[in-house]
Image (tube, rainbow, N blue to C red):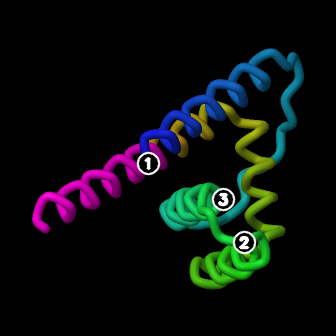
Amino acid sequence: MRNLVTYLVIVWVAIIGTLCGCSQQSSSSKPTFDEKKFVELYVEALLLQKSSLPPNERKQKLQALFSHYRFTPEKYQQIRHYYEQHPEEWERVLTKAIAQLKKQRQIVSQKKQAQ
């Protein structure tokens, strides 16, 4: 879990640095979606990518995640593209994702201590 938080921070810094270095940003409009659900989907997708499951099983589980959160892969990519063009909003989303990961880590730690 700690590695995942570090990974998120590194990805965030790389994206922000890349996008801030660009002199032109697209004026794409913000897609309509539930940001809370997107953050939850994003976190679960990251955890799934870091899992040791075989690629076919990961792909199936990712499809199930999209279905559960009612996102299509295309909609997910559209939202990610929007955030690539708006790093200040992506920073806010990543902050929420990191907070959610820390909360999950705390819950796991508490469960381990209770055993």
Q: Which mark is residue 49?
A: 3
Q: Label 2's element?
A: loop
Q: Is residue 113 above or below residue 88?
A: below
| Nearer-the-camera pick, 103 or 29 | 103
Q: Which mark is residue 22?
A: none
| Nearer-the-camera pick, 101 or 50 | 50
Q: Callout 3: few (<14), some (14-19), or many (20+) C-alpha neighbours within 10 Å?
A: some
| Bounds of the magenta segment | 96-115
Q: Which mark is residue 1?
A: 1
Q: Callout 2: few (<14), some (14-19), or many (20+) C-alpha neighbours within 10 Å?
A: few
Q: Earlier in the sequence, mark 1 or mark 3?
A: 1
Q: Which residue is mark 2?
A: 54
Q: Earlier in the sequence, mark 2 or mark 3?
A: 3
Q: Position of residue 79 (x, y in %)?
A: 73, 56
- Disc 2 from disc 3: Cα separation: 10 Å
Q: Is residue 76 above or below residue 95?
A: below
Q: Position of residue 98 (x, y in %)?
A: 45, 43
- Disc 1 from disc 3: Cα separation: 13 Å
Q: Position of residue 47 (x, y in %)?
A: 55, 59
Q: Is residue 60 magenta?
A: no
Residue name at image x 65 percent, y 70 percent:
53
Q: Position of residue 90 (x, y in %)?
A: 62, 40
Q: Earlier in the sequence, mark 2 or mark 1?
A: 1
Amino acid at pointer 1: Met
Residue name at image x 51 percent, y 34 percent:
6
